[in-house]
Amino acid sequence: MTTTWNTKFVAVTFFTILLISFTVHRFTKSSDAVLHSSNPTVDHKEKTITIASFPLEDEIQASLIFKNISVLIPSITFNHKDHTTSAKKSRATILNPRKKYCVGETIIVQIEMFDHLGNRKTYGGDFIRARIFSPDLKAAASGRIEDFNNGTYHAYFTLFWEGKVFFSLVLYHSSEAVSALWRARNQGYGLIYFTGTFTNGTHQLKSECGFQPNTKKEICEYRKEGYNELFYCAKPESFDCRSLIYLQSFNRDLSFLSTLEKSLLDRENIAIEIPKNFESIDVNSCTKSSPPPLKQCKIGMVPPFPSGFVLQNKWRPAFCNFANFTLHEQMYTCLNDKMIHMTGDSTVQQWYNYLEKTFKGLKHFELYRTGLESMALSIDLQRNIKLQWNKHSHPIVADQFYWVKDDRYVSEQIDQLGGGPQHVIVICLGQNFRPFPIHLFIKRVINVRRALERLFLRSPDTKVIIKTENTRETNLDAERFSDFHGYIQYFIVKDIFRDLQIGVVDAWDMTIAYNTDNVNPPENVIQDQIYMFLTYIC
């Protein structure tokens, strides 16, 4: 696998990304949103962000991914909000409506987009989110969007359950806002800066840190030679570079958007429902025979989109079955003799917290760390279970300082593990990368891919689970944290890891279906993600 990935990845990744303009990630036959246009009248430009010391081969791959995504995102110039997409002026209709709808069928909704003056849009690129739901049944599922790049979109919904089904078609961002967000994101690293705390005996000094050095000052360069990662701090006078102990992030008073572009990202212009000429449909069970049983979810299966649905407030995979955890004890037994290594952001830390809280035999081991929690450990000696969570390394965007002396990149953490049938690795990257140029994220995911290849060469029976990132709040600073940024990262992760022997927990799909609107979703959603995780490893 390691020897063939270089050419296979380039061929598969960039061919499939090119197909996005026709079917929105057709290689998975699915998507929840659409973001691009290939209209010839729209000017497409890209700005390459170069990071020093990235090996040439990986640099080429990262640059190709960036360029092929950039081609698909419209570069739009507009001089008034009236000429941008208006959700309220647009309309949605059921394509080829029928008198009767049956469970298991697909229904198509056609969306026609207009600007604020009522003019038909002639290019695509709007970021649309589609969802069906039945409140009485506590049921919901994501929809897949197809962009025809002329102002027309199709939303595809699988009718998973019987009953009255309602539709939500949301214009999350107009194509003009998408264009502005993509340009702004890749314009530089200035939106977030870091303050490092250096210590020398009883003395401490703070200094600015980040991914780009301040060449006007003497700098400390924190280089991970084997992992192609760089981070810098301005060197405080009389302090050794190795005396850096804490970091904390801050928003810089800076925007790469114009005043007009910012207005498109005001909360009242984000996630607006598109009017429909229908309210709901009634879905019937039209056959007495049951569908053939699905196999249990196993590592190596590639989830479609949507990968499942919610019914009675419980997630149901559409491509496989959960393990038969009829008793709490069965889930706990699944963890016997396992060393579970979780690495990533606070959303996978929620998994750690849920497992520690649910399984009382796991005893928290106090690590006596100060600041934002960046590592956690629980042990069950009787069952021989070790559960550990580590944050991924820079960037961590948080309102607290955190300890960095034992900081490790995800690829570095993987390389420090021997692996084997008792080892389970969970990885989640995404939320903290949204305010930074996409090249940083692409580079990091490629590095993790390389580390996993090395892991599978020495320990092919190690179980690896990739958790995709969650959707998050709509009321945050969209330039830094918009779900559009997460959407791009979601597909990058799925594509770069797609031919590895891993399990995927599609948290993006789940949180759209649940409509959580929170980067850290409620416990019932975490429980469903955990059930998927346990099914893969048991």
Image (tube, helix red, strand yellow):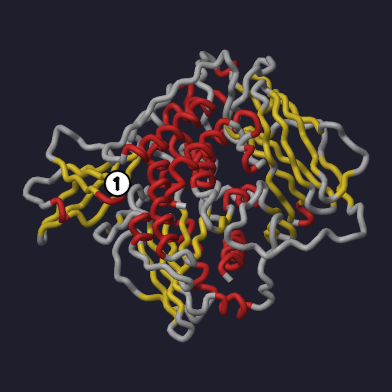
- Residue with the mark numbered 1: 229
Q: Residue at x 54, y 50 (%)?
A: 499
**Quadrant location of residue 413?**
bottom left
Identify which amino acid the numbered label 1 is placed on: Glu
Q: How many marks?
A: 1
Q: Residue at x 88, y 44 (%)?
A: 101
Name the one closer to the observer, 113 or 399.
113
Name the one closer to the observer, 429 or 64.
64
Tell me if residue 416 comes above or below residue 178 in the rendering.
Answer: below
Q: Residue at x 74, y 48 (%)?
A: 133
Tell me if residue 46 comes above or below residue 418 in the rendering.
Answer: above
Residue 122 location in percent, x, y? 65, 17
Q: Residue at x 43, y 84 (%)?
A: 381
Residue 12 location in percent, x, y? 53, 39
Q: Is residue 253 visible?
A: no
Q: Quadrant of the C terminus?
A: bottom right
Q: Is 329 left, or right, of 418 in this rendering?
A: right
Residue 141 location in percent, x, y? 70, 49
Q: Is 279 left, or right, of 489 in this rendering?
A: right
* Number of residues whose C-alpha sits closer than 10 Å to that of mark 1, classed few (under 14), some (14–19) or many (20 or more): many
Q: Is residue 481 visible?
A: yes
**Quadrant location of residue 333?**
bottom right
Q: Is 256 left, or right, of 134 in this rendering?
A: left
Q: Please, what secondary structure does the residue beneath circle 1 have?
A: strand
Residue 273 location in percent, x, y? 68, 34
Tell me if residue 151 comes above or below residue 163 in the rendering.
Answer: above
